[in-house]
Image (cartoon, coloured by chain):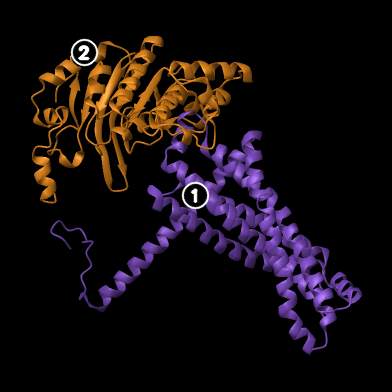
Amino acid sequence: MVKPNKDTSTQESLIRVEQLSVEFGQHEVLHDIDLAIIRGETLAIIGESGCGKTVLLKTIIGLLHPTRGSVMFDGHDMARLGERALTRERIRFGFVFQQAALFDSMTIAQNLAFPLRQHTQKSATEIEEIVVARLTEVGLPESARFKKPAELSGGMRKRVGLARALALEPEVVLYDEPTTGLDPIMSDVINELILETRRRHLVTSVIVTHDMKSAQKLADRIVMLYPLARLQEGEPQILFDGTPADLEQCRDRRVTQFVHGEAGERLREMQNGL
Amino acid sequence: MSKDGSLSDDKTPGGGPIQAVADWVADLGGVVTDWLVGLGSVALFAFRTILWLTTRMVRRETLIPSFYQIGVLSLPVVALTGTFIGIILAVQAYGQFHLLGMESRLGAVINLSLVRELGPVLAATMLAGRVGSAMAAELGTMRVTEQIDALSSMGANPIQYLVVPRFLGCLLLIPALTIMADFMGVVGGALYSVYLLNIDWHHYLKHSQNYVRGFDIFAGVFKSLFFGGAISLISCYHGFHCDPGAEGVGRAATTAFVYSFVAILLLDVVLAIGLESVYLAFWPEGPKLF
């Protein structure tokens, strides 16, 4: 495994994933993951589908529970927090879901206002002002707020999802495949919005993606996860941990294959039914 | 046994009758364990719902749409079903009562059947079909499209936000739907008996009044509370634990209805026995139809 060239021990880590394993029944998805995310950094987690990227992201925010190990956020073990404390910590996060996960029974304005109504004492007028401001930030017209999510295109829904995640000005933003399923221009628009968000607020970002262009453009540091079933005995699940420049220099064939999008022996394996 | 000493999962035939019986017992044990785990899981879900109901105020904006969906939109279909059941009871019972020359007592049997059994059970069945499966499908879609995860990630408890209003809606409005089914059934049965079967209006009313007790109406409405609670909890549980994809959502909706219907009948048996015992404890002479 390539070690990060930053000395993370000397910097304040906001999120510490310690010996984390997650199993669903008999199926283990994550095994013994150790990861420290420093305050203010943008970390991209890459890896092929099914390697556990989204599971890791959902475990960080406490939507999934670790089978072993822990996720420490700002000194709190997320799995051991009570309901109220977990809510208090969760609203320090913003989560951008892969398919935006907008509430389809609500209008766009109601979607954006939801976290503000839940956790602030702001008046209806103040909330409306924030909603309009957030929509403008992600490049959507004011008129979009009266529409239902089903009336919007995929790119617009993702932008609303981003605006909703940022509504409470979170310290950490978790992005689950923010550019998947979008055309190249809209993908770059989303990338630019993520960069813009980072410039505007001092946020720590964790981006799960298999879009190498996004990872290279956005990340300060890249971590590559590998499916457990394909690892050799005793090998760590994190195949690579380093900067985007290190990734270019990496000689691990599994990493270079992923970075350059080459099927290699995988096609033969699939044809042989492995 | 496999090489490492563990029991193999593959059961090969030919292990002798003892092995066959052992396998059968093991399979049965597996089914019973799964069933008990499922039941425990529903009970835990119900407990968490009641806990949230008692610890936090329900928001008006979540309560009103639920009440509208569950109560107002179910009213026409429940009223229609009640009317037809009243008429059907009159049609079916008339022949038998006519043979005995007791057709003037038709009102007693129609109205007693309606308020004690058919009104509450039919209102509950319609609610399970119309609202229960829709709730399971809606929550299932929310689960599949990560909307429930989105709620949690924004610090809103999904049980408090999604289940509690639906539970309250079913619990508080099913008595009203039951009364509506009872009323329309009574009216439908009475009109058919009097105007089409030519039963004397005075006798029809007098016998109804003599034999249908206030306790019968209370028993029907009281039972409906349990039906409403069970429908909402079972349907929301299946929506929350929906398998991925369109197939998972469809299965959640179907399972929600089937289990709700079984629960309605099961609760009906238990409550009917319990309420009858209560009645006999207070009025030991018991109900007399003739």
**Image coords of residue A268 (percent x, y):** 9, 45
Per the rendering, the colour in which chain A appears is: orange
Observer able to see residue B117: no
At x 62% / y 43%, what residue is drawn?
B66
In this view, the mark in front (1 or 2): 1
Look at 66% across and 39% down and name the residue there: B64
Q: Could you classify mark 2 by the number of other residues whose Cα lies within 10 Å: few (under 14), some (14-19), or many (20 or more)?
A: few
Identify the amino acid type marked 2: Lys
Say whether residue B165 is visible.
Answer: yes
**Mark 1 highlights which residue?**
B137
Q: Is mark 2 on a helix, strand or loop?
A: loop
* Cα gap from disc 1 to disc 2, whole angstroms: 49 Å
**Screen quadrant of the N terminus of chain A:** top left
| Whole-percent x, y for residue B16 in the image | 22, 77
Q: Nearer the viewer, residue B35 or A191?
A: A191
- Rendered view: B212 above or below A241: below
